[in-house]
Image (cartoon, helix red, strand yellow):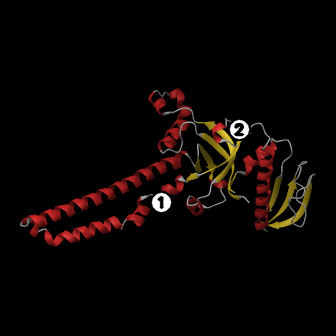
Amino acid sequence: MKDYIYLDEDLLNSTLAQLDNGLIKSYLNSDEQTGTSSDKSTVNHSKGVDNFLQLGAKYVKEVTEETGMELTNTQVRALDYVLNDYAVDVLLEKIEDFENYTNEILESQEGQLINFQSDFSLYDFSLIKEITDDTMIQIFFGDSSESAEVRELEDKIKPYKQQAKKNPQIKAMVKEIETQIKEVKKKQSEAAEGFSVVNKAAIAADKFLGESLFVRTDSSLALCKRECFRLNKGQLALLTETSRKINVLGLVTAIKTTTHEDQLKTFNTSDMNQIPSMLTDIFLSSFKMLEMGDRIITPIAIFFE
């Protein structure tokens, strides 16, 4: 059973359309006033599709068929999910013997279809930007254990500061505690600075990477559209807690074979069209999200199995 977290319906249909055994399409004519839809499904001689779905009527047949069945919005979404999920299975079945297909990420070439399983990390710069701003950091870390530790140490030495001038042992104790306070404050400052750097990076990334989310896998980086995820921000944030591996079905868009840092030193105005690619590459490489030899993937579907 597949647990889909991402599905690019447009890319799925485009890929299926270029194969020679047919394509499933769901045309939904929504009635905005009543909230109902009239559904028409089309299949052009698609082998093995005939019996995959029955909801009171056959929506998919080996010849084009229309039904005037009225569906609620919930039923429309459910039907669309079933059609799209099934279409992924159809695509996976069809590409098994496709010469331009591989399931080995390190052997894949640009333009190939690929389906592989891997550990993963997910990066949502819009969310990172929001949760690392000053207001949120103050909420989470304004009264942290380190701050409490500083207050406790300061309260501890207050009664001894006057005595420290006359007693060498007390003076040594006070000095040791003051050293501890400095160390704790240093850690606090470094943590705050770290979050500030992350926030600035996330703001920059959110500006020039738009609404993209990134899924980092072994030797690849998938560039995902936010609207194609079936999970909301909170669900995506907690997704990294899973120990499951993900399956990625997609197209190999490019292979990272060059480093753009040196190009900035020799940059001239005629290279203006390369600025987005150069800065994106430098940014992703700086955070170890993209390394030499990595495949850049345009995903069709991402799922657990």
Find residue 8 and report its horizontal and vertical position in percent. Answer: 70, 51
Query: Residue at coordinates 56% horizontally, 52% vertically from top-left?
Result: 121
Where residue 61 sits, quadrant-wise, is: bottom right
Q: Mark 1 against mark 2, which lies toward the viewer?
A: 2
Residue at the spot of label 1: 131
First in residue order: circle 1 vs circle 2: 2
Residue at the spot of label 2: 112
Of all residues, the one furthest to the left in this rendering is: 166
Task: Report whether 272 appears left or right of 302.
Answer: left
Disc 1 to disc 2, C-alpha distance: 37 Å
Q: Quadrant of the N terminus?
A: bottom right
Task: Report whether 143 appears left or right of 157.
Answer: right
Q: Is residue 187 above or below residue 14?
A: below
Q: Quadrant of the C terminus?
A: bottom right
Where residue 144 sits, quadrant-wise, is: bottom left
SS at circle 1? helix
Towards the viewer: 21 or 31:
21
Query: Residue at coordinates 46% horizontally, 30% vertically from top-left?
Result: 262
Towards the viewer: 159 or 69:
159
